[in-house]
């Protein structure tokens, strides 16, 4: 007499059935549906495919539903069928393959100097001086078409920007460069002021994205010293609006505190004297812990409980390499230290760029003059594995070469689907998300 082991286990031991089926890959699981009607009725259930993909961490990628589906639905908005889950699974596999091979579509969307930029799950926002005024442009992340223009005022210069899915927040100051002329221009984001320490007024605009209307204006003071990327910083998200402005004269024009990120648990800042990270609770706004940063980190990012920092280390003949460190904000433990190889290739070491996604660590080493910048992609889980014997070179999965050499004002933001890179007047979107 024939015995159906799956039906038998399903009746008395359903947890064993799921464990057995979770050992299969997606193709084998789909083939198992063809065995008989009983197997198909159990496996083809959309809820089972959801559990399967959850066990494979496919849905650990934020917003993967809206990127994988034409409709842009979120998981909570409707019941997904097996076909939906297979579509998400296939999208995830292609997305991972693209990151690991540095396969992406490149598109330049802006041909003017961008002062600052930000992005949420659906839009990219750029701020720059266009047609004799400061404009904010809104770009669709999938089509990369400009959808809307904003302005904070004819004589207000936008110096910092951030957004979430509901609000766009900008910080603006009087447009000294185009109006009063009492500072001189170096590169976008880097200005030196002649009237050092003189207090000035800044304005924070909170704009509701759906209507485009400004719903709140917040005035503040700052000191005109240093570079804009250090003096001004504004962050929004997780129910918080955080602004950082330098007030008062600084010794040696040096900004001691830099806001590097926040989430629902912590606000993280970097202080340079002595070098350290300060972890501040978002609920109490009290200092939770201090982490010895070892060195003055010229580049650092915080997200999802991890801190990634880049520090220039002097090599032979005055050249430098870069030390990339990954920290656990909860414990203060330095999980990994990665040295970018071949110090002979590096410049002054001040402008190594770092960032990371759910699965990947992105670094852009600061090369010497006339050397082309290279975007390096590493496996983040391998990079933070304390027991890994991999060298810094072997953790690199792929590289993406840029056509232009280095620039002081280079910067980028990245998530699981796109890397947005700014270089002088080049504003390029690298799309790793497969087209659907």
Image (cartoon, rainbow, N blue to C red):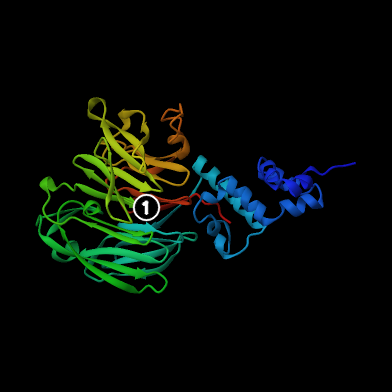
Question: What residue would you read off at disc 1?
Answer: 265
364, 345: nearer the viewer: 364
Density class for disc 1 (Cα within 10 Å; few <14, some 14-19, many ≥20) is: some
Residue 363 visible in this rendered orientation of the protein = yes
Up-down relation of residue 187 to residue 322 (above or below): below
Query: Under tag 1, what secondary structure?
Result: loop
Q: Position of residue 383 (x, y in %)?
A: 43, 35
Q: Position of residue 100 (x, y in %)?
A: 51, 40
Up-down relation of residue 67 to residue 301 (above or below): below
Q: Position of residue 49 (x, y in %)?
A: 65, 52
**On the rendered image, what quadrant is the C terminus found in?**
bottom right
Q: Residue furthest front?
A: 12
Residue 404 visible in this rendered orientation of the protein = no
Is residue 34 rendered to the left or right of residue 102? right
322, 183: nearer the viewer: 322
Image quarter of residue 367: top left
Q: Residue furthest right?
A: 1
């Amino acid at each position: 007499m024939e015995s159906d082991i799956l039906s038998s286990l399903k009746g008395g031991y359903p947890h064993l059935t799921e464990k057995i089926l979770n050992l299969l890959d997606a193709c084998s699981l789909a083939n198992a549906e063809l065995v008989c009607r009983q197997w198909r009725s159990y496996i083809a259930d959309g809820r089972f495919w959801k559990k399967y993909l959850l066990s494979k961490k496919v849905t650990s990628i934020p917003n993967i539903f809206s990127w994988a589906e034409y409709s842009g639905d979120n998981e909570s908005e409707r019941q997904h069928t097996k076909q939906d889950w297979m579509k998400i699974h296939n999208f995830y596999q292609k997305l991972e393959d693209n990151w690991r091979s540095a396969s992406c579509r490149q598109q330049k969307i802006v041909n003017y100097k961008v002062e600052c930029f930000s992005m949420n799950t659906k839009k990219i926002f750029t701020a720059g001086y266009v047609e004799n005024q400061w404009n904010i442009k809104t770009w669709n992340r999938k089509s990369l078409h400009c959808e809307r223009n904003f302005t904070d005022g004819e004589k207000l210069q936008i110096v910092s920007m951030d957004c979430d899915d509901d609000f766009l927040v900008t910080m603006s100051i009087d447009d000294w460069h185009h109006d009063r002329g009492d500072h001189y221009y170096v590169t976008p984001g880097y200005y030196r002021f002649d009237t050092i320490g003189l207090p000035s007024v800044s304005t924070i605009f909170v704009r509701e994205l759906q209507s485009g209307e400004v719903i709140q204006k917040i005035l503040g003071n700052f000191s005109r010293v240093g570079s804009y990327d250090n003096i001004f910083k504004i962050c929004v998200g997780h129910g918080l609006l955080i602004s950082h402005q330098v007030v008062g004269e600084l010794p040696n024009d040096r900004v001691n505190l830099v806001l590097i990120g926040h989430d629902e648990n912590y606000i993280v800042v970097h202080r340079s004297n002595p070098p350290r990270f300060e972890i501040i609770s978002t609920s109490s706004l009290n200092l939770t812990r201090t982490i010895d940063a070892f060195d003055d980190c010229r580049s650092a990012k915080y997200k999802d409980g991890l801190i990634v920092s880049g520090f220039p280390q002097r090599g032979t003949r005055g050249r430098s390499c870069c030390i990339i460190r990954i920290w656990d904000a909860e414990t203060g433990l330095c999980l990994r230290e990665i040295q970018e190889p071949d110090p002979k290739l590096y410049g002054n070491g001040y402008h190594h760029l770092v960032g990371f996604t759910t699965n990947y660590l992105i670094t852009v080493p600061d090369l010497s003059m006339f050397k082309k910048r290279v975007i390096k992609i590493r496996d983040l889980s391998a990079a933070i594995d304390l027991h890994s014997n991999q060298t810094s070179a072997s953790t690199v999965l792929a590289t993406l070469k840029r056509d232009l050499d280095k620039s002081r004002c280079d910067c980028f933001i990245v998530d699981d689907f796109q890397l947005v890179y700014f270089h002088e007047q080049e504003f390029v979107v690298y799309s790793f998300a497969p087209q659907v």
